[in-house]
Amino acid sequence: MDRAQMLADMGFSSFVADLYPIGQQPMTMEAKQAALKAHLGDQDRMQAIVSAAISQARDDNDEPLFVMGYSMGAITAMEVAWSGLGNEIGVDGYVIFSGRVSDAHGRIMPDAVAPFFVAHGEADTQVQVSGLENFVDDVELAGSTVTAHTYPGAGHLFSAFGFPNYNADDDADSWAELTNFLEGRVGS
């Protein structure tokens, strides 16, 4: 919600989608991991949630559309790209913070996929940064680009307010880089 407000303060329209089932907000790490596993295990549900959220957010306007997420939200954004749903609904860019960029289903990135912005901690033990180089190659083969920023010593969710690995300096840098990416895509 904080990031959506920050984007709104910059002049962007923003919309936040809740990826958990109605009334279910996991509080423990075990519950969060179970919710993530269930979310990733039902691609039809995930795509239905994203399609509905984007439809609601779009509300018949033609502003550029970016799908952004942190961790679970980033994995969901990646699913939008890998599945081809992003091409179908006209996504203009993807923003991935601390999210897995490799595809668990072995799919090839669709041609003409929108550009990506990726910010990732090099010390992330939950989502390894090692697949980033192959991901960049896959996206370039699909005819697009990746603007990637890695942060030495930064762990998972290094830029998420209130999380144990939060690093204010890396957060400020990654947000500035994201701002440049967005402004370069929308001509601000």
Image: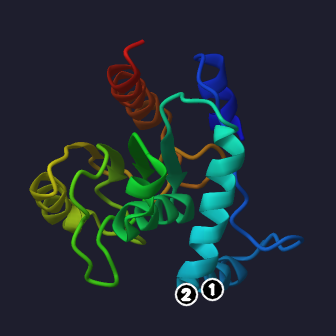
Looking at the rendered structure, the kind of residue marked 1 is: Ala
**Nearer to me, 44 or 116:** 44
Residue at 23%, 51% (x, y): give it. 112
Res. 148 image quadrant: top left
Residue 177 in the image: above or below residue 123: above
- Tell me whether circle 2 and circle 1 mark residues in contact (CB < 8 Å): yes
Q: Where residue 179 sits: x, y (%)?
A: 42, 24
Residue at 51%, 47% (x, y): give it. 68
Residue 26 visible? The answer is: yes
Q: Is residue 37 left or right of residue 149?
A: right
Q: Where residue 2 sits: x, y (%)?
A: 69, 36
Res. 141 image quadrant: bottom left
Q: Quadrant of the N terminus?
A: top right
Q: Where residue 25 sits: x, y (%)?
A: 81, 69
Looking at the rendered structure, the kind of residue marked 2 is: Gly
- The residue carrying pointer 1 sits among few (fewer than 14), some (14 to 19) or many (20 or more) residues within 10 Å by Cα, namely some
Which mark, by number, is residue 23?
none
**Nearer to me, 155 or 100:** 100
Res. 40 image quadrant: bottom right
Looking at the image, the residue that sits furthest to the right is: 23
Distance (Cα) linking label 2 and label 1: 5 Å
Please name the residue that numbered disc 1 is placed on: 38
Q: Is residue 106 left or right of residue 9?
A: left
Please name the residue that numbered disc 2 is placed on: 41
**Nearer to me, 85 or 41:** 85
Residue 166 in the image: above or below residue 44: above
Residue 184 in the image: above or below residue 81: above
SS of the residue at dot 1? helix
Q: Where residue 99 sits: x, y (%)?
A: 42, 61
SS of the residue at dot 2? helix
**Nearer to me, 125 or 48:** 48
Residue at 74%, 76% (x, y): give it. 28
